[in-house]
Each structure stands twice: as structure tokens, then as C-alpha cells.
Image (cartoon, helix red, strand yellow):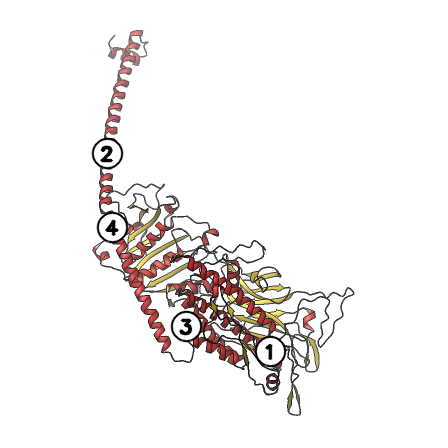
Amino acid sequence: MPPKDAKSAQKKGGKLSKAEKEQLQKEEDERRQKEDEEARLLAEKEEQERLERERKEQEEHQKLELKDKDRREDELNELRHLVEENQTAVTKWETDSRAKAKWDRYMRCDGSPDPSVQQEINTFINLWCEDPEVQIKPILKECALALRLLEELEGMLRDEPEPADALRYQETLLSIQTLIQSKLDHSTEEILKVCVFLPGHSGPMLTQTLRRGTCRQWSRMTSSHCVCGPTLTRTQGTSQTFKGFQFEEVGLGFELPKQLAVSDVAVRILHTHYDHLSHLANLKSQNPSRMSLGLGTREEPLLEGATPVGECGETEGDGDRRGSTQQGGAEEEVQSVRGSEGRKSAVSVISMKEDGRSGQKQLEDAQQKLEENGSQIDTMLEGDDSGEGDSTPTPMDPVIDSYEGQVVDLQQYTPLGGVFYCDVFRLPPQSQQLNGWEMRELLDTGLQPFPYPTEQTQIQGSASMKLEDSGVLTSPPVGVTVTLPDSVLFLEDPQVARWDPEGQHWKTDCISETSYDQAERKISFKMDSFYAFTLLQDSYANMPFQSWELRPLGQDSALLTITAALTEVSITIKGSKCMLQSDQERGLNHILGQWMSPSELQKAMVSAGVNIFVNQYSDKYVSVNAKDPLIEHAVYEQMALLSSAFAFSWSQWNTQCGHERLVLQVCEHLDPVPVRDDSWCVYLLGARRSQRLRIKEHSEAFSPELDPGSEFHSTFLHMLRDGMSPAGQDRRSHHLFVDAVHRLLRATRPLTYS
């Protein structure tokens, strides 16, 4: 039966014969063979097309590689020339600026000494040491001048002077710091000798304020038999116990235990915006082969040749005369310490003795501290000599609290808001008024710290206490309340650390019952004795960064925005200056909107608690996206060169491209407006090649495939210039602007820390 009849019979429901079934199977097999053949031919054609396409792509890739290879040397030489040209111009500008600053300093003629001139600074220190003035207001004025001189010394040390000059500056700085504290102590003693009842207060007190970095808060509470204070007080014929006080104006308060509240003692709380203690911990904990501390404060010397500062004091006769006339003289003692290998180094040791008081303990402590620092400075200089001209700083070991777990690691935590000196002293004899005469008992003991806590000791004062049957006097802790300084932003609850004068470091022991009121920005705690203390914040609380963007605002102007872990920071760069912008005003008002150099801005932001800057230890405390530092820094140089015309931004693919390659988003951007999301292109950068990728930021997966129509280039600079518009090519950045952008990028390292 014909096939047509077989199909007709099948449709009619009739049964097919065996021949008919075989015929149908044969037709089905032929149809399948035909389809398979067609599929094979199509696959072969597609494979041939793919091979041809890959061959062409390979040829094109080889052409691009050959083209890149042919121009590689020229591109590298051009980039090297641009970088060296900018660096030479910046170096010349810095040299001229230092020369101009030195000339302006010479022509200032304001009576202040030039700290770079050995004779002038020695004369200043000697005259101030011999000055018998002990009144608080003149002393604070002199302290303000001394602190300005310290800032000048720190600036000179940041310029990396010759080793001999660096040693001299180190000694001078340390001497001035010691003298400042000595003068403040003697003013304290003078205040305690004359207690005047102030109406409206439960005890005598004095509050002085000197801004701009000196002693911002000078607070003192005293007690005696006749005026109110931390002992038994007398007010309108009645007695009451004075245990503490809150200084609302300066944000300080204290609470005394009963043993001190009924004793003839004085409590001094001195808050300084400067920190002259932390560097001692750095010197003790680190092994510096070079004192290259970036923007930090470095330890400093005194001067060879001229008369070094000695021990300033008085004879007993002078003390007697001064006790009655409130005036007196001073005499000078000089102690000189010679450095190792015959190096002469006149080290000043300062100790003031007035009214016949003995300062031997302070003298010995100061001398020991200077000798320790001098030996470490010698080690530093020997390290420089052995370097044979190598200017690369040797990395310093981070602070490791291996000997005590409660020692603060100053590489991980930053002291903020200055130092609070909390001391208790024995109250000196008070003056008596009799028949128009003022009488005072003169002692040669000087300002005497009151030992607390004490054991087996009976406190003598205006009231007596009986020891317990065991003969041991219990010593409850001292309460302290501090309002956070307005010049500091704490991103987290602050931590309290006290200074250990014996170990020369900050520690967190001996502090308990710490509580923080975030609304009022007050922290309260208790200490088992009287210590200098400071407030700490994690240096890396803002790291790693969430994202970042650098976009131009015009010719030689750009905006760097970093979205950190706890805050967002924007820095406007214009020429050689930078300005901080932030929605967070509290704690930053004094630096917001202020134009500064990159180094000044970095120092100001770190001091204010907004640290987005990294150092050689940061990767030990922050989880980072590690990259080859040579490639990374080369990219920062080229970004800075093009930052007037191109915008750069963070890319999620940077974490997936490996250690030796970088990925970021880039687009040409000539208008001072935000960049549109569809304008960005993704670039892959390596040690030998830069290229634009086919993928976008929101693609599903990472692919290193080259974007069609683009080429390889040996440098990032030429990669971007390849498709640059004529308007963009006209924007050639000034060398100072390029340097400012480069400094900020290297200080924050967004390609690694985001």
C-alpha cells in the first residue's frame, strides 16, 4: 500500500501492516538523519565562525600588544618626566617657602626668640627660668609663647633637618616642656599660699582660661581652717563637710573620699590641650631608627655651645626675703650630659626652688627622663649614620603590650582632647591678717604632693580620724566628671587611661565605674589615686571605608569624598590648600571651612577625632584589600595628574581582581556637578598594562575582557588620555594642586582601605 494510503488507513482507524510500519520507521530515520546533518553543518559553520572570530581577536590582540610594546618606552618616559617635573617644581616651591618663612621670622621683631637660633632660644629659656614671676595670669601668657615655640620646633623637625640640628631641636623641645610644667607647679603653690574667700562659693577657687592651645582650664579648690574647701568648711558660723565640686563653666568636677574631705589638702585639675606625655610612651615602646613620625610630634633637644638651662632656684636668704616681699631672685645650676661616641649634647635640667623649697625629686626625674631620651636619640642618629645615605625610613615596630595587658597601644588608640592633670597637694600655711600686717609661716618644703592612698598613716588636718582596729586606713577611690571638649568629636564612647609615671606609658588600670552620658557628653569614673588621665578613641574606628570618590570642580579644584565606617567626610582641594566639609558640626566647628595645607588638615582632623588617614601599622588593625604598594602609589600619582578633568570612584570589582591588579571607575567630568551613574567606565590597572573593561559596575560577574574599541596602554595616564576630549586636554593641572591631591590619596589609600 502506498504511504499515502497507509496514512489514510491509520487516520481511519485501520490497522497498519508490517510493511507499512517499516516504511514509516524508515521515513522517520531519514528525517532524523537529515536534521542531524543540518545541525552538524550548522555547528561546523558556527565553530568555523568562532575560530575565525578568535583568530581575528587574537590577531587584533597581538596588534594591540605590539602597538603597546612599541610605545611603552615612550609612555613610561613621558610619565616619568611629568612626575619629575612636578616634583622638582614642588621642591623648589617648598624651598622658597621655607626661606621666605625664615626671613619673615627674622623680620617679625616681636620679641619672641627664633627657636632655630641656638643663642636666642637658650637666652629665652634661661631668662624665663630665672624669672621670679609666679602669678598665674603672667605665667599662662608665657606658656602661650612657649607653646608657639614648640609648634615652630615641631615644624622644623617635620622638615627633616640634619641629624645634629634634629638632636638640638629635640633637646630644646623637651626642655621647654619641662619648664612649662615647672612654672605651672610654682604658680599652683603661690595660689595655695593666699586663699581668698569668694562669695557665693562653698570654698575658695580659681578658674583661669587661656585658649589657643595653652592651659584651657586651670581649676583649683583649696581648704584651710578659715575658708571653704575640700576640708571642714565654715560658712556663716556653721560647719559643713566639703566633698566635691562641679565646675560647670569648664566642664570639670570631682568627688573626694571622706579621708581627704576632712584634711588640709588642695586639689588641682589642670586641663591642657597639648599632650606632652604620649611621646614619652612612644620613645619607650618603639625602637626608632629614624625620628620620621609624619605629622606627629617628635621629641626634642637643647643646644650646644650656649649656656644650657640649669636648675633655677634661690638661696635660703633669698627665700626669706621673698617670703615677706613676694619678690626674689633665682640662681642657675647647669648639668651637662655628654652623648655617646664623644658627641656633646648640653641637656637642660630644670628645677625651680622658691621660698627655700626643695625641688630635688623633680630635678632627678627630669634628668633621668632627659638621659633616657638622649640615649634613644643617639641610637637614632647612629641608625642614620649606618644607613649610608638611604633616606627611606626604617619601619618602627608597633607598640605591643607584651609586659602588661593594661598598657595602652598608642598605635591602636589615640589620646584626644589633651591631658587632664589631677593632683592633690598638702595645703601650705595660710597668711594671717593682724593689725594691718600680713603674716605667713615660711617653709622650705615647696609644693608637696599628698600621698593617697596611704596605709598605716594618720591624716592630720583640721579634723582627725581614728584608724580602724587593724591600723590600716581604707582608701576609697576619687570620683571625676569630665565634659568632653568642644574641639573633639568622639565617634564611639571614649575610654579613660591614666598616666603611669614610673613605666612612662598610659594604662587602663586603677580606673573603675566608668559611665558615659552621650546626650550631655559627660564621662564619669573613679580612680584609686590622683593621676594625669586622658580620653582615648580607636584610631581606626572609621576603617575600612565603605566607598570613595574624587571628582573635579574646575581647573585645579577637586572634591574628595570618603564614606567611612562611622561618618562621611568631604575635602575640597583648591590649589595647594584643602578644606574640610562635614554634616557633623559638633567637635569640628574650629576646623570646618578652614583652608589648610594637606599636612595641617591631616593633623587637625586626627586631633579632632576624625581619622581617615593610614600609617605603616594600619593594616595590623584593619581588614584591608591588600594591593601591591608600588602599583597603588603609581596609580595615585597618575590620578593626581588628571584630577582636574577626570572623576575617579570606588569599584566593587577591586576586591576580585587579585593582589597585583587594581579596578576603579573613571569618567571624564568637566562640570562641577555630581557624576551620573551611567557615565562611569571600569578600568583594570596592572604593573605593565592598563585597559578599559567591557563589564560595568552592576554586571553580574567580573571579567577582564577588553572593551571593544579600546586599546592597551602601559600607563594609566595614557590610557585615559587616549579618549580625552579637547576641552579636557586643555586642563593641565598646576604642580601644587597635583601635589595636594597626591598627598591626600597617599595619606588615605582608598584603593586598599575600602
Residue type, mark 4 in image: Glu
Relative to 635, residue 146 above or below: below
Residue at the disc numbered 2? 55
Is residue 722 among the parts visible in the rendering?
no
Which label is found at residue 189?
Answer: 1
User: How far from the left and from the top, in percent, is residue 234?
Assistant: 68, 80
Name the foreground residue: 582 vs 427: 427
Q: Earlier in the sequence, mark 1 or mark 2?
A: 2
Residue type, mark 3 in image: Ser
Q: CA distance from mark 1 to mark 2?
A: 91 Å
Bin the neighbour count of mark 1 within 10 Å (Cα to Cα): few under 14, some 14-19, many 20 and up.
Answer: many
Q: CA distance from mark 1 to mark 4?
A: 71 Å
Q: Earlier in the sequence, mark 4 or mark 3?
A: 4
User: How far from the left and from the top, in percent, is residue 753?
Assistant: 42, 52
Residue type, mark 1 in image: Glu
Residue at the disc numbered 4? 75
Which label is found at residue 116?
Answer: 3
User: How far from the left and from the top, in percent, is residue 3?
Assistant: 25, 11
Task: Determine whether the residue tagged by mark 1 lies in a helix, strand or loop.
Answer: helix
On the rendered structure, is 167 left or right of 369? Answer: left
